[in-house]
Image (tube, rainbow, N blue to C red):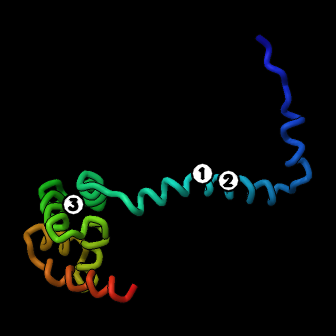
């Protein structure tokens, strides 16, 4: 079976575009394609995903697991556990690894919860 070469016909709507216009069109179409995936990522997470994020931030699995468990307990999983750790680090003015270590031991969650709830009121 021979495929009919219709490339010249299919590209007619693009033939008068400059390189810049083609570039912009390409990236605009890419954005349209990935936007539903990005939207899904912003609205859906799981303990496994959050542990994975923490592992990639440099935490051990022994630290990541309790951080996610506490986050689940306090209904903060949707905020992102990496975000929670970074927020706590900023509030305490410490390195994020130190902040995560404290959170994994149950230290500082009241401050995080208070800050996250205050942030919801300001939204």
Residue assigned mark 2: 29
- Give the number of the mark in front: 3 or 1: 1
Residue 19 image-quadrant placement? bottom right
Residue 57 location (% of width, % of height): 29, 61
Q: Secondary structure at mark 3?
A: loop
Q: Residue at x 89, y 36 (%)?
A: 9
- Give the number of the mark in front: 2 or 3: 2
Dot 3 or dot 1, earlier in sequence: 1
Q: Secondary structure at mark 2?
A: helix
Residue assigned mark 1: 33
Q: Quadrant of the C terminus?
A: bottom left
Residue 6 location (% of width, % of height): 85, 29
Q: Residue at x 14, y 77 (%)?
A: 109
Q: Residue at x 20, y 80 (%)?
A: 113
Q: CA distance from mark 2 to mark 3?
A: 37 Å
Tell me if label 2 and label 1 are in contact, CB under 8 Å: yes
Along the line of sight, which residue is nearer the eye, 89 or 109? Answer: 109
Q: Secondary structure at mark 1?
A: helix
Q: Residue furthest right?
A: 16
Q: Is residue 120 left or right of residue 63?
A: right
Along the line of sight, which residue is nearer the eye, 36 or 66? Answer: 36
Tell me if label 2 and label 3 are in contact, CB under 8 Å: no
Residue assigned mark 3: 59
Along the line of sight, which residue is nearer the eye, 57 or 38? Answer: 38
């Amino acid at each position: 079976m021979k495929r009919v070469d219709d490339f010249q016909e299919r590209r007619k709507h693009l033939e008068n575009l400059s390189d810049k216009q083609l570039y912009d069109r390409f990236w605009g179409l890419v954005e349209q394609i990935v936007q539903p995936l990005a939207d899904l990522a912003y609205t859906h997470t799981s303990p496994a995903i959050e542990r994975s994020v923490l592992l990639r931030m440099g935490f051990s699995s022994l630290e990541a697991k309790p951080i996610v468990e506490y986050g689940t307990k306090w209904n903060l999983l949707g905020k992102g556990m990496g975000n929670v750790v970074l927020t706590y680090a900023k509030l305490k003015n410490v390195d994020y690894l130190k902040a995560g270590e404290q959170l994994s031991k149950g230290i500082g969650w009241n401050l995080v919860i208070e800050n996250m709830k205050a942030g919801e009121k300001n939204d």
